[in-house]
Amino acid sequence: MKMIKEYPVGTIFGSEEIDAIKRVLDSGEVLSRGTDIDLFEKEFADYCGAKHAVAVSSCGAALHIATQLLGLKKGDEVICQANAFWVTIVHLLERGVSIKCADIDAYSLNIDPEKIEPLITNKTKSIYLVHHGGNPADLDEIFAIAQKNGLPVVEDCAHAVGAEYKGRKIGHNSDIACFSFSTHKNISTLGEGGMIVTNNPRYAEMAVGLRTNFPFGKKIKRQVQSLGQYHKPQSPVFMHAGDAWDYDWIKAEEFGSSYRMTTPQAAVGRVQLKKLDQLNNLRTRITEKYNKSIDQLEGLRKLSLLPKCRNSWYLYSFFINPESGINRDEFVDCLNNEHKVKTVLRYWPIHLGGIMRMKGHQHGDCPVCERVWFNEQMSLPISPQMKADEIKIITNALRIVYRKLAK
C-alpha cells in the first residue's frame, strides 16, 4: 500500500497560474518591481479588510521586518506562545531580545490569554502569537491585554490565510500580521512568498523600504548641494546616489535587505487569492469527514474553535484523551507502520529547543503545552488535492487503531 502523507504542495495550480506567468514574461516588464506586485498588495489588503499590505519574499522575511518596525533590541522582552515555530522567534534571538514563553490553551492550541499578563514587565515590548494550524486565536482578549499595557501585537498568520475571527478575515484589525505563501500553505506564490498586513501607515511605509535595502534612522537636510569639489547635477537620478546629495545621517537605526517578491510570484498570487476561499472550503470538507470519525471514538477529541470563527485548516490536529489509556506514540506508530498513514506533529515546544535551553528555558516552563505535545496531540494529512479514497483509508485506519489500543 502506498503511504498517504502530506502533499508537497498545499494548493492547486492550474492553467490560470501558467497564463499569469507567461503574461509577465511576455510583457518584458521588470521581474522584481512589476505592477502585479502593487496589484497583489492592494487585492490582499482588500481581501483581509486592512489598509496596507506589503509583499515580501517569505513569512520569515515579514517577521524579520516586524522586529525592525518595532525597533526591538537587546534587553527588550517579547511574550510568545510556547508552540510557535522556530521562524517566529529566530529574528528576536538574533537581536538579543529575551523571550517569555506563554503557555497555550489545551483545546485550541493557541496562546492562553490568561497566561500573558503575568509575564508582562516594564521591559515587555510586544506580544507574538500564532494562529495555530489556521485556528484563530482569541484576539479580543489578547488585544484588550495589549491595549491595556501599551503593547503592539505581532500575528504570525503563516497558517491562517483566509481564516476568520468573528466574521472578519484574519489581518483586518492587526498591528502587524505576517502571512506565508510557501509550498505547503493554503495558497502559494511558487514555493515561497509572504505578506505584511497592517493598519499602521508608518509601519507600511517602513516595510516597503526595509524590503528593498533602505536604511532608517535620524538624518538632517543638507544646506549645500555639493560634496567637496563635486556639485549635485541638475538631474542626479542616473547616479543612483540615494539621499547622499540631500541628507547627512546622524544615526542609522535599521538597515533593509533584499526581501522582495518577484513579479511572476505576485501574478500567481493574484490568481491564487481568487481561489483561496474555494481551496479552504475543500479543506473544511475534509475536516468535516475527519471530525465525524473522531466524534464516534470516545477517547479522541476534536480541536476547539471559538464561536463565529472560521479555521483555514492548514493543519488538522486532534487529541487523545488521557483517560482513554491510549499511548499517543503507539497510536502514531500503528497509523504509520500498519496503515501507511504518515503523521507529522507540529510544532515542537520552542522553550525546549536547544538554543532556548541554552538561554535558560527548561522543562516545566509551559506545562500545558508540554503535556499536550508529548501525550495528546496528533495530526492527519490534509490538502485540497486529497482524493476520496485517501480520506476513507485514513478514517478507517483511525477506527481500527483506536479499537486496537483503547483500554
Image (cartoon, rainbow, N blue to C red):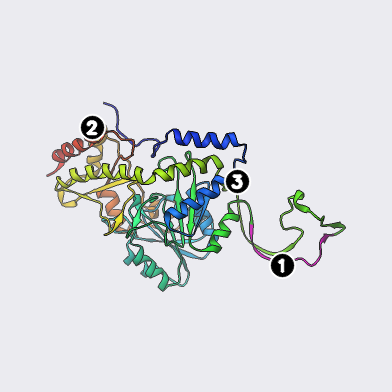
| Dot 2 crowding, Cα within 10 Å, few <14, some 14–19, many 20+ | many
- In the rendered image, the residue lying farthest to the top is 1
Lower position in the chain sequence, tag 2 or tag 1: 1
| Dot 3 crowding, Cα within 10 Å, few <14, some 14–19, many 20+ | some
Residue 373 location (% of width, % of height): 30, 50
Foreground mark, 2 or 1, reads 1
User: What SS does tag 1 mark?
Assistant: strand
| Dot 1 crowding, Cα within 10 Å, few <14, some 14–19, many 20+ | few
Q: What is the C-alpha distance between the residues marked 2 and 1? A: 68 Å
Magenta region: which residues?
Answer: 215-227
Foreground mark, 1 or 3, reads 3
Amino acid type indicated by mark 1: Ile
* Residue positioned 43% across, 50% down in the render: 86
Q: Which residue is mark 1?
A: 220
Q: What is the C-alpha distance between the residues marked 1 and 3? A: 29 Å
User: What SS does tag 3 mark?
Assistant: loop
* Residue positioned 60% across, 55% down in the render: 209
Q: Which residue is mark 3?
A: 33
Q: Which residue is mark 2?
A: 339
Residue 130 location (% of width, % of height): 39, 55
Q: Locate residue 28: give its quadrant.
A: top right
Residue 355 at least partly seen: no
Residue 1 location (% of width, % of height): 26, 26
Amino acid type indicated by mark 3: Arg
Looking at this view, is 128 or 407 the one in front? 128
Lower position in the chain sequence, tag 3 or tag 2: 3
User: What SS does tag 2 mark?
Assistant: helix
